[in-house]
Image: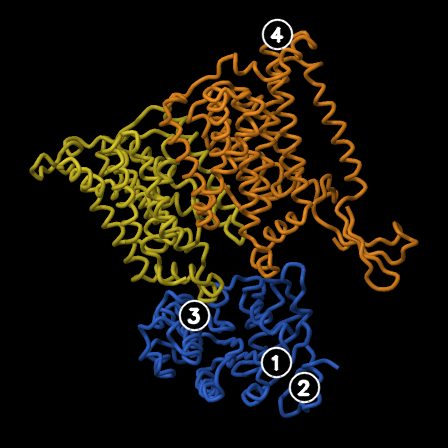
Amino acid sequence: MSGWLDALIQGVLLGGLYALFAAGLSLIFGVMRLVNLAHGDLIVLAAFVILVVGDRFGLDPFVAVLIAFPFLFAIGFALQYLLLNRTLGRDLLPPLLVTFGLSIIIQNGLLQFFSADSQRLRSGAIETASIPLGGGIAIGVVPLLTLLSAIAVIMLLNFIFYRTPIGRAFRASSDDLEVAQLMGIDHQRVFATAMAITFVVVAIAALYLGLRANFDPTIGPARLLYAFEAVIIGGLGSFWGTLVGGVVLGLAQTIGARIDPEWQILAGHLAFLAVLVIRPRGLFPRALD
Amino acid sequence: MMDDGEAGPGRTYRIETAGRLSRVSAAAACVILFGLALVPVLAGRYVVQDLIFLFYMLALAQCWNLLAGYAGLISVGQQAFVGLGGYLLFALTLRGEINPLLAIPIAGLVAAVLALPTALIVFRLREAYFAIGTWVVAEVYRLVFAQIKALGGGTGTSLPPSVTSSVPGIDWIASMLDVRTPAARDIASYWLALLLMAGTLAFVYLILRSRRGLALGAIRDNEAAAAGLAVDITSVKLAVYVATAAMTGMIGALIYLQKARISPDAAFSVLDWTAYVIFITVIGGIGTVEGPIIGAIIFYLMQRYLADFGAWYLILLGTLGILVMLFAPKGLWGLVAERYDLTLFPTRRRLVVEAEHAERKGSSRTLS
Amino acid sequence: MPLLEARKLTAFYGDFQALYGIDMTLDQGETIAIIGANGAGKSTFLKAIAGLIRGAPDSVLFDGEPIGALAASDIVKLGIALVPEGRRLFPSLTVEENLRIGAHGGKMREPKAQGQWTLDRVYSLFPILKERRSSAPSTLSGGQQQMAAIGRALMSNPRILLCDEISLGLAPIIITDIYATLPQIEAEGTSIVLVEQDIVQAMKVADRLYCFQEGRLSLAGRPETLTREQIHRAYFGS
């Protein structure tokens, strides 16, 4: 029995990681209806950036990520401003294919520079630290931090989206791009800002990805799928929904793994497909549109 | 290919899809096909193997082109049906002891049947989300086949020579062309691949020229307007999805008959069966029949001469794909066609207005 | 020098030409009205001025400066605001947020000597909006939505207010209310370009009248000098 309880707790904690993967995807979809097929690879890229920054300056990953923030913010802004903005329009194909190409470039670029070897972010004792809950169940400190960070990120994104001028510009651009321009909103910059913020979220996701498990250049696409599933399960346009979606996915995976370790990923995908069949618009679809 | 109709006195309109050039190119296509069929007689085994690869990549690209370029269904999960076809071939020949030649169409049929429930789920996702949804489904297929121990589970399995050599005609080829059995096997696969490639091309071309093809054109150009014209968009899309699943499944079965070794990771590879295929279609020109042909030849040459560069080669592919999408979204064929107003496989209909019956050719005006 | 001038302004939607060489001037403090049948190019003209359709730089002059090639987001910062046809409030913003976002571009501009439009002044112009400040725009009546759309445009402190069919779909009494606020807006030194299908309303407030027909200017003049006959012909063609 305690094995099942443990699976539930671990599932919720794993959901925190998936919510972090998904939050950035949710934001850029919410602002510019862009589906970024390179999102998972960007998370892996950010993990390598943290790794390199940490190694080069002998820093703990938690500090290295702070140094990586401004770089990733700038890269995200530039990527959107210089490349992805050119792909947005009525036609669906350009953004999909350009981000798909980007995914292949990032994966193979990382392979070229870092080889296919597994890497891990090292942060000393905290990696293995855990809080015993009694009954043989313990909560790892890193998984707990992951979930708390996910909640903090979702709160922050909600604050930005609903309480700040840039958030107002995000929502206005999403509602009606033409009229947004009439308000003096430079949508190219607004989109670039959204992508820059997404990159910061991606860096946080990458930190926990690298602390919790090994990573290598090829694992990006699977992270994209988890992120996507969390967004759809939660319902498009709701950040809290995305968090719930991540948790549902995490639960499905740990419960599946509990039945048979080989079923972990499959169980997650099947849960996603089940939600799609039962509630095509997700658990918490945005009331509008 | 004309629908004649009287429209007012002294004036005839006809809808034309085939121009004179295209009739020439149809004849040329037959000659080329015949020539390609003779290649194994003249060329060595490596050429045959290379061309098999070219043929099935082209066939896959035509399927994806029909799906994405015409029906607007941008799938990044077509590897689901390649892998399905491959695994079905293995299951049917290894477990069912069915002849591979028969197993290929059965694999296509089963792929089509499985495409229906798949469509039921992924069609709930719109636009870009459909793309990732198809990818998830392909992953589900991969993970499920990795669980089937009878087919080798996660590590996969091989076809014994007794199966690969059981394609009818191999002995005949071996004795006629005086080659050893493995080479004869390649030649049989070559003809099958050629047949399937030509069949896919003809299939796509005929679909596009049919009434349904017209509906597809309407969907591609403007979905809302197509709905207004009472075109049942969902059923047309579903038909295309299922038909391409069948074609893709058969191609997958043939690919793995030729490879004689299958594993879940290879058979459901997004890079091999979707990324390359998208690259071919986009580089050549999406939404045209000619584009993928050009794209497949370019891809084949790159694969042949640059694949040794490994990661750099793939970085180059990705970069080229992005550049073409940004600066020449209609692909290389699009550039050529625009410049010279050329169509080898005309699928657009042209309204030809004729002033008098008598002066047919002279006063024809093309309204496009 | 006129405040705003269109010179041989043309506009295209893809291959379709919607405007053919329109010439028009607007002076400081003036209100002009553009009338014409559906599809005559009136809205297209406003979009071209506002930068939603871009053309040759010197096809539009503002204070003598060429602005025809500028983006919409830059033009509003110069002081030209458009109230779009059909109000088009942002559905996921509250009424007050809709007003505030109107100031997004205006804040970039130097404060003018004349009164600045602030949230409070818009609320005093349209008191009902203050009551409904936290509501979603979809819960507002058509007239209230139109007031919010005008208020949103005013928040950028425009020197020229372009109004596209502000009476569309509204009850006559509401139209009268909304038109009654125009003099207050003009009193701030704002010039107004109205696009109207309601000719009677347009003639009442306009200093000068322009009529479009199939993308061309078919008539221009002061309302009092124009005959019914002339307007009828310019509107419907002969």
User: How far apart, in angstroms, are the residues tagged by discs 2 and 1?
Assistant: 9 Å
- Chain of the residue under label 2: C
Question: Does residue B15 appear left or right of residue B331 in this picture?
Answer: right
The x, y position of residue B274, in whole percent, is 50, 34
Location of mark 4 (residue): B180
Earlier along the polypeptide chain: callout 2 or callout 3?
A: 3
The colour assigned to chain C within the rendered structure? blue
4 and 1 marks on the same chain: no
Depth order, front residue of C233/B8: B8
Q: Quick check: B142 above or below C186? A: above
The x, y position of residue C213, in whole percent, is 68, 76
Q: Are marks 2 and 1 in contact (CB under 8 Å)?
A: yes
Location of mark 2 (residue): C231
Residue B365 is tagged as: none
Earlier along the polypeptide chain: callout 3 or callout 1?
A: 1
User: How far apart, in angstroms, are the residues tagged by discs 4 and 2?
Assistant: 92 Å
Secondary structure, mark 2, is: helix
Indicate the amino acid at tag 2: Ile
Location of mark 3 (residue): C89
Depth order, front residue of C210/C23: C210
The colour assigned to chain B within the rendered structure? orange
The structure's colour scheme is by chain
User: How far apart, in angstroms, are the residues tagged by discs 3 and 4?
Assistant: 76 Å
Question: Does residue B155 appear left or right of residue B236 in this picture?
Answer: left
Label the yellow chain with its letter. A
